[in-house]
Amino acid sequence: MHQYIIRNNPDGVKGLCGKYNMFPRTESEEEKALNKISEQGDIPAGEIIELHPDMDVFLIWQKNKKAGVIEEKSAETETKPVETKTEVVKDALSNVKVSNVLIGVGATLIAIMVIKTIVS
């Protein structure tokens, strides 16, 4: 997650690092700095999460879910003939990517809720 934040919100990372008197020059140093900041407790870790470029999307999703705008639907499995082994591999990789994204979103949302609970 830190690498994604560093690449997509470099100004925010530089600002947060400066707040903690760290002035990294490379992405590698920025990642080390964010790791050190996140080890300082829940509030600094929350500040890193707030830098996530997609934070607004997560918050809108969470708000809509609480308001009942988003409905949970179970995934229906679709059977289709698979012509080659390559297609099977591509389909499996696609499912893994989607699963990883959903796991990341879920973990981020849980972290946000924990931080909000601790802060309030």
Image (cartoon, rainbow, N blue to C red):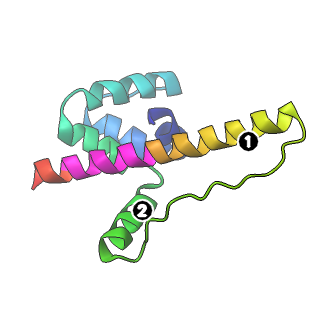
Looking at the rendered structure, the kind of residue marked 1 is Asp
Magenta stretch secondary structure, dominant = helix
Q: Nearer the viewer, mark 1 or mark 2?
A: 1
The span shown in magenta is 104-115
Q: Amino acid at mark 2?
A: Asp
Say whether residue 21 is visible.
Answer: no
> Which residue is located at x 56 percent, y 58 percent?
75
Residue 10, position in %: x, y?
49, 42
Res 60 quadrant in image:
bottom left
Rendered-image quadrant of the N terminus? top left
- The local secondary structure at tag 1 comes to helix
59 left or right of 41 in image: right
Left or right placement of residue 73 versus residue 21 in this view: right
Could you give the CA–CA distance between mark 1 and mark 2, rounded to whole angstroms? 30 Å
111 in magenta: yes
Q: Which mark is residue 56?
A: 2
> Measuring 68% from the left and 42% from the top, which residue is drawn there?
94
Q: Residue at x 32, y 28 (%)?
A: 22
Q: Earlier in the sequence, mark 1 or mark 2?
A: 2
117 above or below 15? below
